[in-house]
Image (spheres, rainbow, N blue to C red):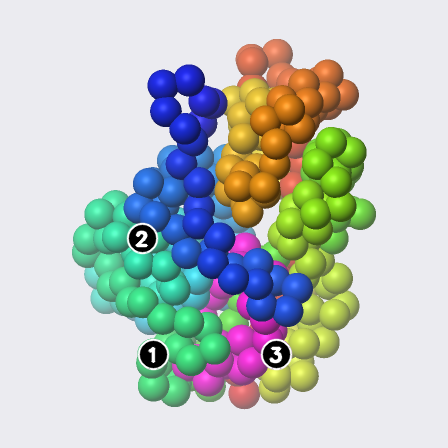
Amino acid sequence: MADSGDAPPVRPRYVRQVENTETFQIPIEAAEIYEKKFVPAIFAEWAPHIIEAARVKPGNRVLDVACGTGVVARTAAGIVGPEGEVVGVDLNQAMLTVASRVRPDLAWRQGAVDDLPFDGDSFDAAVCQMAFMFFPDRSHAFSELGRVTRPGGRVAVVVPAALDDQPAYRQFVDIAAHHAGDEARALLSTYWSCGDLDALVATMTGAGIELDDARTKTGTARFDSAEDLVETEVEGSPLADRITPDAYSAIRRDVAAEMAAYSTPHGTFEIPLVCHVVAGLIG
């Protein structure tokens, strides 16, 4: 996603702020970048973990909430087989357009987690990967996932752990804040706002979902270079429209210098990403 100088980078369009959570409505170009960059760099690794936590089986009907371009839905489809069904739902039509192009055989619906467009007891499993931190009412979100899941089915979510538990990302945010101020820290910290595992479990059980599994795992976020990390994270947030060129350049420079230990012998840039995987049983 490096800027070649031929054209400005494509940026998600910031829409509004709800409580302490920034939400996004994005153009199709940004959804394409999401599928090309974010999915292989970060999200693809976690899709099998959430499907395993939800105990998805052949023949199941699975709902992927806040599906993005559909990497979890695609993973689920490989498990449920032709006798099952996978539905992806997302607020952003651009995400759904890309998801549908990648897998036109799956069902894609536009909708929000606070009012899922499905009848109760419709699915054997409802999953949500890397999006719960953006929901303004997480208790209601769990209630909606539970509502559409049949008794005996499971709800599973994956969220990044708190920023204090992310050695590399914490260093990146510190560098960004040093050059771009407290607003940069606030914007980039949104992603880690659901990282208290005990609080997440308490929210789920408070919504009437019985705890079935809760674990913390460390994965790897993979980028082409230190500059690629900076551009992926900055361009994927509202910070892209609020940062000065000088600050952006300084962040690139310092991340490359101060985080050089994450450069690999084969020329990539790989950093640890700690996430919580939580699953619950519907009674």
Residue 75 location (% of width, % of height):
38, 51
Query: x and y percent of residue 231 in the render?
Result: 54, 30
Which amino acid lies under the numbered mark 1 shown in the image of this protein? Pro
Which of these two is toward me, 56 or 229? 229
Disc number placed over residue 94 in the picture, else none: 2
Q: Earlier in the sequence, mark 1 or mark 2?
A: 2
The answer to whether residue 215 of the structure is visible from this angle is no
Numbered disc 3: secondary structure: helix
Q: Which residue is mark 1?
A: 117
Query: Mark 1 falls on what kind of element?
Result: loop
Horizontally, is 250 left or right of 102 in the view?
right
Sequence-wise first label, 1 or 3: 1
The mark closer to the camera, 1 or 2, is 2
Is residue 195 visible from the viewing direction of this image? yes
Determine the CA span between mark 1 and mark 2.
18 Å
Task: Give x and y (percent) for residue 11.
Answer: 44, 40
Q: Residue at x 39, y 85 (%)?
A: 121
Check disc 3 and report the residue beneath it.
139
What's the amino acid at mark 3? Ser
Instruction: Return the residue nearer the eye: 60 or 160.
Output: 160
Image position of 127 with respect to 162: above or below: below
Mark 2 surroundings: few (<14), some (14-19) or many (≥20) residues within 10 A: many
Of the residues under marks 2 and 3, which one precedes in the sequence? 2
| Cα–Cα gap, marks 1 and 3 | 18 Å
In the image, 93: left or right of 230? left
Which residue is found at the position 54% from the left and 87% from the top? 283
- The residue located at (62%, 17%) in the rendering is 264
